[in-house]
């Protein structure tokens, strides 16, 4: 009877927490609750937008790969590059979320992740057309999307108070090997960029040398 009572109390507390979050999001009654509800609603919409964007990218890449096979690898950036760029630019807002206190997370790891992705995307991939058609870009986009598709749904469920152990486990367990592969692929992107830059400089020097002769 004591165990049943404890379980019933836990279930009631969970339902009350969910109702409270829903109330703060959609039915604020006081000025303090109004400010809190606006922040929660903003976070919910932001994470929902990111989830939709990354879902579209992942679905588009997968459909193209199943339709065109290996030929789709070279056109990955041209197909999803704009949406990926928008999602990565929006991710800079997460640094302000943490600094402002509306998102509970450590600032330094998120700062490193966001800045690394934006540097690779805009300084290495967008600025170099030779890199855009490389298969490593497709692999990198896939890994980034999988990581974000594990993170944003978990955040959305937490905001609604309906988080589950399965989603929690996937978010913090499956992301570990994927993150390791992502770091390795990011190193391959930098290597490709460096090799292409070295090739360009060498050929430029050679052409100048030929012109002088």
Image (cartoon, grey):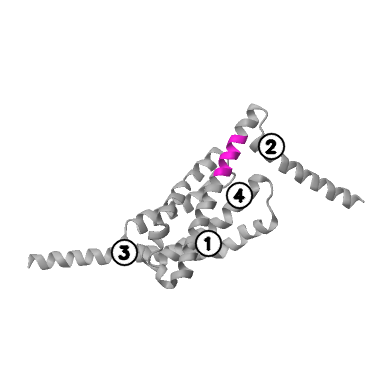
**Residue at 42% in and 72% down:** 70
**Residue at 68% in and 59% down:** 166
Residue 16 at x, y percent in the picture = 76, 41
**Residue at 56% in and 39% down:** 42
Q: Residue furthest front?
A: 67
Other-residue count near label 3 (Cα within 10 Å), few / some / many at <14 / 14–19 / ≥20: some
Image quadrant where one finds the C terminus: bottom left
Label 4 or label 3, whichever comes before in sequence order: 3
Alpha carbon of mark 2 to alpha carbon of mark 4: how far? 18 Å
Residue at disc 3, secondary structure: helix
Alpha carbon of mark 1 to alpha carbon of mark 4: how far? 18 Å
**Residue at 38% in and 59% down:** 78
Residue at disc 2, secondary structure: helix
As drawn, is 149 to the left or to the right of 61?
A: right
Label 2 or label 4, whichever comes before in sequence order: 2
Q: Are marks 1 and 4 in contact (CB under 8 Å)?
A: no
Residue 161 at x, y percent in the picture = 68, 46
Residue 103 at x, y percent in the picture = 58, 43
Other-residue count near label 4 (Cα within 10 Å), few / some / many at <14 / 14–19 / ≥20: many
Where 187 falls versus 15 (above or below)?
A: below
Alpha carbon of mark 1 to alpha carbon of mark 2: how far? 36 Å
Other-residue count near label 2 (Cα within 10 Å), few / some / many at <14 / 14–19 / ≥20: some
Choose mark 1 or mark 2, whichever is in front.
Answer: 2
Alpha carbon of mark 4 to alpha carbon of mark 3: how far? 36 Å
Residue, disc 2: 23
Alpha carbon of mark 3 to alpha carbon of mark 2: how far? 52 Å
Residue, disc 3: 130
Choose mark 1 or mark 4, whichever is in front.
Answer: 4
What span is in magenta? 37-45
Choose mark 3 or mark 2, whichever is in front.
Answer: 2
Residue, disc 1: 179
């Amino acid at each position: 009877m004591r165990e049943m009572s404890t379980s019933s109390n836990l279930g009631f507390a969970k339902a009350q927490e969910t109702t409270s979050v829903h109330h703060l999001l959609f039915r604020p009654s006081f000025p303090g609750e109004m400010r809190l509800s606006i922040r929660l609603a903003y976070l919910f919409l932001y994470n929902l937008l990111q989830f939709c964007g990354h879902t579209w990218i992942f679905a588009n890449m997968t459909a193209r790969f199943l339709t065109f096979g290996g030929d789709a690898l070279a056109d990955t950036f041209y197909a999803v590059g704009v949406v990926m760029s928008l999602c990565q630019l929006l991710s800079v807002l997460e640094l302000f979320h943490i600094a402002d206190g509306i998102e509970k997370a450590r600032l330094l790891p998120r700062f490193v992740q966001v800045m690394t992705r934006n540097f690779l995307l805009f300084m290495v991939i967008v600025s170099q057309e030779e890199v855009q058609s490389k298969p490593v870009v497709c692999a990198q986009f896939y890994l980034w999307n999988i990581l974000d598709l594990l993170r944003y749904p978990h955040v959305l469920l937490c905001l609604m108070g309906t988080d589950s152990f399965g989603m929690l486990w996937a978010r913090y367990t499956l992301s570990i090997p994927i993150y390791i592969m992502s770091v390795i692929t990011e190193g391959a992107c930098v290597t490709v960029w460096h090799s292409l830059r070295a090739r360009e400089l060498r050929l430029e020097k050679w052409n100048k040398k030929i012109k002088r002769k």
